[in-house]
Image (spheres, rainbow, N blue to C red):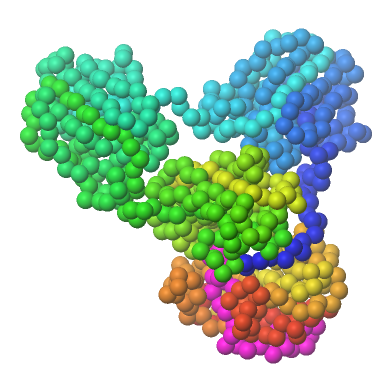
Amino acid sequence: MHKRIILLVSLCFLLFGGLVLANDSNTVAYINIAADGWSVQIWPDNYFDAENNPTDVIGTTQVVDGYGQYTAKVDFSKTENGFISEIGFLDIEISNGELAYPNSFMKIDSFKVNGEEVALGKTYTSSDDDIDTRVNLYNEWVSGEIKEGRTADGTGDVTAQPFNVDAFDQITSIEITFTLMKGMEIGTAIPDEARAYITFAAGDWGVDLWGDNIFDPDNNPTDVIATTEVVDGYRQYTVGADFTKTEAGHANGIAFFDVEISNGEILYSNSYMQIDSVKINGESVALGKTYTSSDDGVDTRTNLYNEWVGDIEEGRTADGTGGVTATPINNDLYDEIETIEVTFTLKKGVELGFPSAGLTAHLSMFDETWENQFILGDDAYNTSGVIVKTDSVKGYDQYTVALDLTKADADFNGIGQLSVVVNDAETYMPYNFIRLDEVKVNGEEATLTGNSYTSGIGAHTKVNIFDDLSSASEDDRTNEKALSRVTSELIDASAYSGVVISSIEATFTILKGKEPEPYEIPESFNAFMMFSDTDEERWQVYNPGFSGDAAVTGDGTFSVYLKAQDLNDADSKSVYATEKAQGAQVFLVDIQELGKAMVELGTLRENAAGELKDTDLKVAAKVFVDGKEVSVTQSRIVVGDLEGNGRLRIELYNAWGPSVDSPAINPAHIIPEDELRIEFTLTGTGIER
């Protein structure tokens, strides 16, 4: 749709564990503890139910209403003994913290026992349920290396038992002060240094040189002398290996040989190592065409002799062209090798097979009125005068795109929808994940809250910065986050309501994603009706989840319906039905995931225009308004995965869709008061049950 009517009532709230996230008062910091054989304890049930505190621990909580410093306490003076002696479990939590402040880190500023400051080991922040945020202070059920959680900088070496409970035998009080701040997942810390070096194994494997030997001087059993160089930018470097101090005084031939950069994929992503010269025993060596790649997504390498590499489908060259080899050196020419020297220039590269100009990345935007928009190439609807800054994507790297709206023919007021799109990325970078690094609105950095997800829209890749009608599906890439932890509302659009937007800039990094498991066709597909009345204050529904939804199993006849009472009773921000409708502006059936399944089966294909509309499927539909059948022109029904989201759409009329000029129904006749029903028959889905 090129424009969208603002018609949504914010009724949605989340109910978790008895706590309703309706306002900040339900985001509370508190301490959990169990002590003295679990005879003394306090948990959320005790805090939030004043009459349910059997062991008389006095807990002091604090409402968490933003990033900043907070204090929580527990007092044991009113317990049976007046103190505790042995702690079995201790943490500090924030109820609903994962929902209100995702990716946060609770930095412990002060930990006091009986009023005295106590030193702690290194802590981390995590969640057991993707709802409440916690810091373990003594949790003996967590052991070994902790690989999941957050710290301030993403570094590890953390513990779930940072408090030495054995140091205290009579504790009357504990007070914890922490600062809530943005955190980084453990393991995502940016390394301090990249270093270039040679790795090598002789033809008889009598001498070798690997990263372990180079970076641990005491672990160099064959006495190879390595010359390395710190990589501090895109420029020329020289590295070497000297075998004259080995037992034989030389290496016998070549079994393996490459030049690598430690942490190169992290600090210099999408780089290409242009090999300027290779010298063996001081003499220049002829080379075949080389390429640059990585085996682990961390270190960068250029193979100079690696016979274990077969067909080369991934890697980088200066211009993306192929004809490369993993054995550019003829190892038969070298019997006794005393020295090796490699000189290379580090520069930006292009992924093999990419178009020479790269893929076009850009911003897509509607303002909050939905009267002004910019979508690259959509000039018939775009507001004139917008200056677009695109970026050329040539591999997995960081990019920046922007819109300058200062010369637009109309003011862009607020933000209705905002996303980053990379054209053709699904073709050239399948399963990629786009990480948003920074968004600026009117030159000021916007606060990003929550985890993004990445969607394939036909051949293109998209990540929403703000879209209050979209949510992640199982087909989207979430960078291993649960669907409940990702969002399409990464900025607070309400902060810009009524504000004239002069510029928007987004910086993002494209990462390699994991190839999904082989697709298995579900047992059924949820079908629901989407309907929007011409009167914005009447019937409106865009989402599934009502009694009138239907389970589609393949070919057959099915029925979906909407009842006014169901919609009015629903706790959803995207539906309501207050009075008799005045006519349709959106009227269709969406069948979730059926489009994807039919693509897998080959019964739904792209047409010449690249749209998923070429299909073997035959569809017949009947429409009933308050029980009375309304005429349908069957030949005008539009069918396909019309939005590239894996759904099969049966479109009868859409004021912003392909049926706008040739509807299958007369939109003026779709005026339900109590019920709207569509009965549809599918033949040719390709699903066999």
Is residue 662 shown to the viewer in this render? Answer: yes
Say above or below: 203 vs 436: above
Q: Quadrant of residue 1?
A: bottom right
Q: Quadrant of residue 260?
A: top left
Residue 180 in the image, given as x and y percentages of width and height: 70, 29
Residue 137 in the image, given as x and y percentages of width and height: 68, 22
Q: Give the range drawn in magenta.
A: 622-650
Residue 653 in the image, given as x and y percentages of width and height: 65, 79
**Residue lying at 64% horizontally and 85% vertically, measured from the top left:** 664
Is residue 90 shown to the viewer in this render? Answer: no
Say above or below: 177 vs 397: above
For the residue pair 16 and 488, the one nearer the viewer reads as 488
For the residue pair 42 and 636, the one nearer the viewer reads as 636
**Residue lying at 60% horizontally and 28% vertically, measured from the top left:** 151
- In this picture, residue 346 sits left or right of residue 368: left
Residue 225 in the image, given as x and y percentages of width and height: 22, 17
Q: How many labels does the image show?
A: 0
Say above or below: 480 vs 557: above
**Residue lying at 18% horizontally and 19% vertically, measured from the top left:** 242
**Residue 488 shown in magenta:** no
**Residue 625 shown in magenta:** yes
For the residue pair 643 and 57, the one nearer the viewer reads as 643
**Residue lying at 53% horizontally and 83% vertically, measured from the top left:** 618
